Amino acid sequence: MYKHIIWDFDGTLFDTYPVMAGSFKDTLKKDGIDEPIEEIMKQMKVSMTYALNHYGEKYGIGDEFITAYDSRRKEVEFDLSKPFEGIVEMCKYVHETGRRNYLYTHRGESSITLLEKYGLTGYFTDFITSQHGFERKPSPSAIQHLIRTYEIDHSEAIMIGDRDLDLESGKNAGISSCYFADERVENPHADYVVTSVEELYKII
């Protein structure tokens, strides 16, 4: 049983990729580009930077597009973004069994705002967002900060995420990692692979 659970946000706690990809698709359409939403999500699930670089090379999008996309996403994400089924109960379970949840995301403060909307902030001990200025995943620096701050035993901590860079950041910090995946596929960076929140109860 793990005592310290470190969560990624997009695609792990919250099902935000459809919202993000939809906003991206809408912004591309304004430039006369029609791209399948499934393909956009595929690129985003590597990383947002990867997606922007991919479409930058493919269509020549730049800073103006990014500004328009961010504006569109912010217009809709608060109303449309929701936690995955069972996540509220899972975080509550971890908290009520005397253990700790932590957030580690490349997002800004919008992640905390969304957690607050669904009554989740009280179940979390700490929140690391882009505002903190740590090196981006897969750097272990943010997780190492948590380990030092809360005197965490490495064997009692786990990083849960939906992308390789989430898992690698955990492994690079010397803790366990769990791949929250759309389908059951092996991942070389993961100690565990789950496809639903329910499966997490067997691990944590």
Image (cartoon, rainbow, N blue to C red):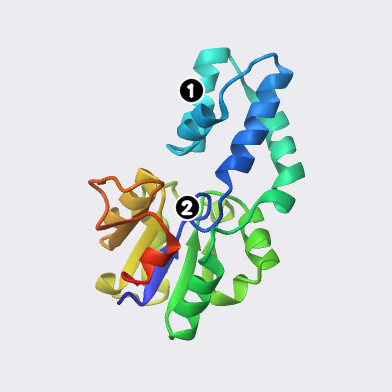
Q: Nearer the viewer, residue 112 or 146?
A: 112
Q: Residues within 10 Å of mark 1 (few under 14, many from 20)?
A: some
The disc label shown at residue 54, or none: 1
Position above or below: 51 against 200:
above
Name which residue lies at 50% across and 27% down.
Answer: 39
- Residue at the (58%, 59%) spot, across then down: 83
Q: Along the line of sight, which residue is nearer the eye, 172 or 92? A: 92
Percent position (x, y) of residue 66?
A: 65, 29
Q: Is residue 144 visible?
A: no
Mark 1: amino acid: His
Local SS, label 1 = helix
Badge number at residue 96: none
Task: Please tell me in which quadrant of the rendered image residue 170 appears.
Answer: bottom left
Q: Position of residue 2 (x, y in %)?
A: 32, 74
Q: Which residue is mark 2?
A: 134
Question: Which residue: 50% across, 16% down?
Answer: 57
Residue toward you, 9 or 143: 9
Which image quarter is the C terminus in? bottom left
* Side (left or right) of 109 relative to 53: right
Position of 58 relative to 154 (above/below): above
What residue is shown at x 46% (from left), y 38% (from top)? 47
Query: Can residue 43 be seen from the camera position used here?
Result: yes
**Looking at the image, residue 173 lies above or below residue 31:** below
Of the image marks 1 and 2, the number of the one nearer the N terminus = 1
Kindly indicate whether the residue at mark 2 contacts the one at mark 1 (C-beta within 8 angstroms): no
Q: Dot 2: within a 10 Å radius of its alpha carbon, few (fewer than 14), some, or many (20 or more) residues?
A: some
How many dots with numbers?
A: 2
Q: Position of residue 201 (x, y in %)?
A: 37, 71
Q: Amino acid at mark 2?
A: Phe
Instruction: Indicate the quadrant containing the N terminus: top left, top right, bottom left or bottom right.
Output: bottom left
Percent across and percent down for residue 12 are 48, 55
Q: Locate residue 199 relative to residue 75 in the image: left or right.
A: left
